[in-house]
Amino acid sequence: MINIELLVIGGGPAGLSAGIAAGKCGVKTIVVDENPLPGGQLFKQIHKFFGSKEHKAGTRGYKIGEQLLNEVDQDGVEVYLNTRVWGIFDNNIVGILKDGKTQKVKAQKIILATGASENAIAFKGSTLPGIMTAGAAQTFINVHRVLPGKKILMIGTGNVGLITSYQLMQAGAEVVGVVEASQNVGGYDVHANKLRRAGIPIYLGHTVIEAKGDIEVDGAIIAPVDEKFKVDKSKSFLIDCDTICFAVGLTPRIELAQMVNAPIIYMSTLGGYLPIHDNRLKITEDIFIAGDISGVEEASTAMEEGSLAGVAVAMELGKLDKNKGVKEIEEIYKRLAKLRSGQFGSKRASAKEEIIKKQMEMKGGFK
């Protein structure tokens, strides 16, 4: 059995940041990730981040990932790759599958940074080859340098859909359109305007009702929808394409939190069902969460939450002075407040406050 002070499950932006924050305080930490490379979504993100300097503004996502990996090495954090966590049991014993062998890890504290999974929508032909998520498309072009198709239709105008569409165009594909059921673009105008300037049509108030093709996608039928999302098939039309990508939101991956019987709450603003946590991201006496599992937001937010959870763990393990730790957490919350301001962020901030309030009201809840 492996004995460790902190086990971080998930090696994306939140998990790496948690490991760094705890490692700097001298906490013996292992980060595990099921993928062959750490960094999560960061290495798919070739665009420059927005925001302030403290949130890596002007730095491309994969560069931020490289910076985090360097810090992990410097702080003595171990990273287990190709390692799947299959269960959390009593006394903080975690089952992992590493190098084809099942092992047990006994951790004093655990941080779940398991991220989120991409959503999909169903329509006739939606299982044909040539249909994939936007994240899969990003993996093709930004990690493996392979075009997933030549003529691509994107579904969804959130930031992921807009950014991925632009990156597909940069990689040499023809983006034939972006379809959005809402009457408004879901992401930032700066991303949508890039597509408009490139001549890529954005079909607001439309949805895909069928993917055409016998053995693979060779077209898509889209139709307008009204304010109640009722489809008007009489005005449907065909778009020529060989690939259809979904960018229709993310759902927090809460399976491990459910295994430890953490209380769950539904927050549509944050992606769906997620664990109830306190203001230090604690869900049980010894388990914390960080990143998209605590509510789907941006990578910058995930990194801040990872740092917060790492600091909180270091305080509880006696590796960080309480007063110093409280000050660090206050500074993190100030930075999170900046990220959660504006049209989209304010709704997420309100949802987060509601979750924390709910935890404090729970009978027998920790404080």
Image (cartoon, rainbow, N blue to C red):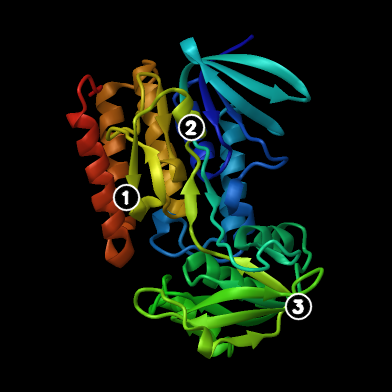
| Identity, as a three-letter code, of the amino acid under mark 1 | Arg
Of the pair 25 and 10, the residue shown nearer to us: 10
Q: Is residue 24 visible?
A: no
> Disc 2 designates what residue?
112
Instruction: Please tell me which residue is depicted at 24% across the width and 32% down the height of the picture.
Output: 359
User: Quarter-wise, where is residue 261 in the image?
Assistant: top left
| Identity, as a three-letter code, of the amino acid under mark 2 | Leu
Marks 1 and 3 sit apart, C-alpha to C-alpha, by 46 Å
Q: Position of residue 265 (x, y in %)?
A: 33, 39
- Please determine whether, in this image, residue 318 is positioned above or below residue 213: above
Q: Secondary structure at mark 1?
A: helix
- Residue 335: which numbered mark, if any? 1
Of the pair 162 and 204, the residue shown nearer to us: 204
Q: Secondary structure at mark 2?
A: strand
Q: Residues within 10 Å of mark 2 (few under 14, many from 20)?
A: many
Label 1–label 3 contact, CB within 8 A: no
Which numbered mark, 1 or 2, is in the foreground of this view?
2
Marks 2 and 3 sit apart, C-alpha to C-alpha, by 41 Å
Q: Position of residue 119 (x, y in %)?
A: 54, 56
